[in-house]
Amino acid sequence: MDSLKNRTLLKVIVLGDSGVGKTSLMNQYVYKKFNKQYKATIGADFVTKELHIEDKSVTLQIWDTAGQERFQSLGAAFYRGADCCVLVYDVNNLRSFETLNNWHTEFLKQANPMEPETFPFVLIGNKTDVDGGNSRVVSNKRAHEWCGSKGNIPYHETSAKEDTNIDEAFLGVAHIALSNEHKQTNDIYPRGVYDSVTDIIDPDQNRGCAC
Ligand code: GDP
Ligand code: MG
């Protein structure tokens, strides 16, 4: 069993216009399912996925919301403690690419991270499968340029329908969120307290106990 010290919970927020495929990406990633029917997400919800990175057990807690919702109505709890923000657009929909600036700005405004310049974002261009790529309106190059202008945000292209590149994209998310977590100085458990708690309840350290 992993000791508590090696467990990490990472909060990931997924934002982008309604219909770009946020819910589909999450469903494909966590449940390996794709649903063709469009069902607007109501409110905000999260799914979790367990990963092993190096010697750590990492739980990605991925928060979804309906794109058309007002940021203000999502509430502070939605943003609190975010370790990474995933911005999603549809490569076949120019408007969904153009609104990325708004999502980026609004996230920083609402989440108010300690170091906004270095807060980890990841960009996903979804629906690369549509029409065999012929209806695409945002080029890979243009997306990379946007990422460059925001301080080199990592970029992934995916198809939630065909399950293309999704594991890789979220693994990238986990890595960047983890590196941000290391940098945070305002741990909820100050180091000393955390260690003494794990000393008490970590089963690895209580070998020989019959209970
Ligand atoms: P959300 O509003 O951002 O959560 O978007 P949804 O996940 O609800 O997806 C909106 C619509 O796009 C649904 O009809 C999905 O089936 C469809 N969709 C999502 N991802 C893809 C994709 O990668 N390829 C294709 N062809 N359709 C997709
Ligand atoms: Mg949705």
Image: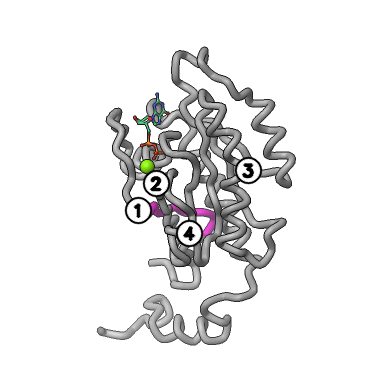
**Residue 25, quarter of picture:** top left
Which residue carries the number 4 mark? 72
Please tell me whether mark 3 sits on a helix, a strand or a loop.
helix
Q: Which residue is mark 2?
A: 66
Quarter of the picture holding the N terminus = bottom left
**Mark on residue 43?**
1
Q: Is mark 2 within 8 Å of ligand 2?
A: yes
Ranked by sequence position, the earlier of labels 1 and 3 is 1
Asked whether disc 2 touches disc 1, contact meaning CB atoms under 8 Å apart, the reply is yes
Name the amino acid type tagged 2: Ala
Q: Amino acid at mark 1?
A: Gly
Q: Quadrant of the C terminus?
A: bottom left
Residue drawn at point x = 61 percent, y = 57 percent: 108
Residue 141: x and y, percent?
A: 68, 26
Residue range (magenta): 43-55
Find the distance from the CA under tag 2 to the CA under tag 4.
Answer: 13 Å
**Looking at the picture, which amino acid does disc 3 mark?**
Asn
Residue 200 seen in the figure = yes
Labels 4 and 3 touching (C-beta < 8 A): no
Residue 127 % position (x, y): 46, 27
